[in-house]
Every structure is written in structure tokens, then in C-alpha cells.
Image: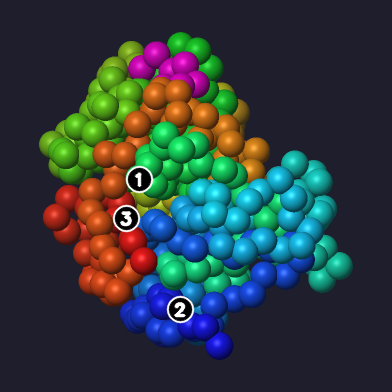
Amino acid sequence: MSMMKAAVFVEAGRIELADKPIPQPGPNDALVRITTTTICGTDVHILKGEYPVAKGLTIGHEPVGIIEKLGSNVKGYEEGQRVIAGAICPDFSSYASQDGVSSQADGCSCHGYKPMGGWRFGNTIDGTQAEYVLVPDAQANLAPVPDALTDEQVLMCPDIMSTGFGGAEKADIKIGDIVAIFAQGPIGLCATAGAKLRGASCIIVVDGVDSRLEIARQMGADVTLNFRNVDVVEEILKITGGRGVDAAIEALGTQLTFEQSLRVLKPGGTLSSLGVYSQDLSIPLGSFLAGLGDHKIITSLCPGGKERMRRLLNVVASGRVDLAPLVTHEYKLDAIVDAYDLFANQRDGVLKIAIKP
């Protein structure tokens, strides 16, 4: 039996490299040889035991690679073709998918609804931090990568770019809107780029790391606020003349940033929440205007599927967004434990790490 290297969840605090059999594709699957993948903040939640997965599961959900083998039912693709697949890889047959919410697809509605069921890589099936990954329902989820684009240019498409852009889309940003974005990690930076593309006239971003704020300006931010130096709520209200922002995007997942997002929101505004929360949230009475402010609080999970990936690849190919600067480090798969240590502890200015098998 042919074997491969894979990063597997062992227990809370331990993800290790292990040998696993190379999976064999069924009729609707594709075996993809990974050329580049990365570590996500959600993987760190898994590492810390804050999000439960099965022991021995291969982690990771952001694949760039080459088709090694195709299932007999998969048409329109070729072995040897460069592809990506979304972190969310629905089969589009569930009630949720057919109702237009593909990220929440459970894949088998006869067994009941499972929230986030569209997220399978590194959650319910083996993921992408390995030499190979099995892509389920490949016909619906594989997207060809244009020859002119490098792995690093498209590495954000499967999750980070789709999530950040999704946050901007769910915020219903209109031309001329003022938008505040809390946290400028990879997802927040993509939300900034997405808000710019949506037509926001003033994008205010908040972070505590000056280097990230500088990258945010490259992504389209107009005003950068370091929360270590200024009361960001007071400053944002001052910038808006006390009116508040049309939309706020929360991209960290903490009580503080969630509450700040509410406090800067205009009556009738939208709070688009992208953060993965590891503790219960509370909604403060004053910030929520006692429930009388006509606010909208909306969450979103990374949209997936080949059409979503095609559109994101088009944006990258057009040159309207360059996300390659978000890839700040590169590690071999053999050194992924060290890569996790760097990423989880946010050392050396890390944003995203390219993992190369």
C-alpha cells in the first residue's frame, strides 16, 4: 500500500506528522497531489482543542495542487491539471445547498441537519496538510488554475479570500459606504480588499500591529487605527461625525471586538461577523440600543464550490487584488510542527505560511 506524509490531530496541543495510506478516489472524487497548502486560524483552534475533531484526522482545508487521479464520473477535468478546491466543498444535494446556503450543506440530509456540514476538509474528512488529498464531489468543487498564476497568488482563494470577501458581501456594502473592519489578520485583510471592491468610500481598519496596518493600506484601507494608541470607538465616531459606520466587519472572534463593532455601528447598520469564537458572547444593552436600533447581525462561513473559486481566481487574474504579500513564510511539510508553533504564537510578523510537501 502506497503511503504519504500527513499532519494529523493527536490530542489538544499536538498536531504531528504521520504516515497514512494514499486515498483512492471513488467515482465522484479526485485525488489531488498537494503542491501548496497553508495553516488557518481555525486549525489553531483545532490544535488547542477549542474545536473538536476526531483523533488521527488530517488537518488543513486550503489546497492548491495537481490532479493525480480522477473518479470515473468526473468530467471536464484532466489528470495533471492544476486546480484548487474550496475549503468548503459541498455536494449541492442537501436542503441547505438547494436553499442557497452551500456552506451549511450536510451532505446527507436524511441524517438530519449538521451546521457547517459543507466544511469537510480537516473537519469531517481528511484535509490538505498532506502530500495528497481526496476531493469529494470533485465535479462540483474543482476549479482550474490559470497557468499565469502562481500557487502563492491563488493560495488565499480556497478559504481566506472567500471568507473575507464573504464578510464584505454579507455586510451589504454599497457605493459610498463607510466601513470599519476590526482585526487585520489574513481574513480581515481580505475583508478590507473586498470592501474596496464593493465600493466603500472610506474603509477604517483596526489592529495592534503596525506592519499589518501598512498591508491594510495596500489592500484599500483609507484610515488605519492602532488600538494600542487610540480609543478606536471614540475615533471612529469622530471620523463619522457621530453618525456611525454603515457596516462593521468583525474578523477576530473576541467579545471586545464584537462589542466595539456594535458600538460604532449606525442605527440600521450591519455587523458582519467573521471571527471564530471560542467563548460565549454577550450583547451589551447600550451597544445594542436595547434591541431598538434596527441593527442587523449576520454571520457567514466561507462560500465554496467551483463557481465561487472561478470568480475569485478571476479577481486575482485581473490584478485588482494581489494577495501574494499575505504569504510571509514558507515551510516544508516535514517541518509543519515548527510552522504551527510559529503561526499559533504569531511570531516574526507571520500572516500566512505556504506549506510545501
Q: Residue at x 26, y 72 (%)?
A: 335
Q: Tell me: 244 left or right of 77.
A: left
- Numbered disc 3: secondary structure: strand
Which residue is nearer to you in this view: 38 or 132? 132
Look at label 2 and name its amino acid: Met
Q: Are marks 2 and 1 in contact (CB under 8 Å)?
A: no
User: What is the span of residues highlighted in magenta in the rendered image?
Assistant: 196-202
Question: Residue 311, position in %: x, y?
Answer: 57, 32
> How far is the residue under mark 1 from the one under mark 3?
7 Å
Of residue 209 and residue 87, the one placed in the foreground of this image is 87
The residue that label 1 is drawn on is 152
The residue located at (47%, 16%) in the rendering is: 199
Q: Is residue 116 left or right of residue 327?
A: right
Q: From what the image shows, is residue 277 above or below residue 57?
A: above
Give the residue pinned by disc 2.
4
* Residue furthest right as drawn: 110
Q: Give the mark toward the camera: 2 or 3.
A: 2
Amino acid type assigned to the residue bearing label 3 in the image: Ala
Q: How is the image coloured?
A: rainbow
First along the sequence among labels 2 and 3: 2
Instruction: Answer above or below: position of 27 versus 36.
Output: below
Label 3 crowd bin: few (<14), some (14–19), many (20+), radius 10 Å? many
Mark 1 vs 3, N-terminal side: 1
- What residue does disc 3 label? 354
Residue 36 appears at what percent x and percent y?
39, 56
Q: Amino acid at mark 1?
A: Glu
Q: Residue at x 34, y 61 (%)?
A: 356
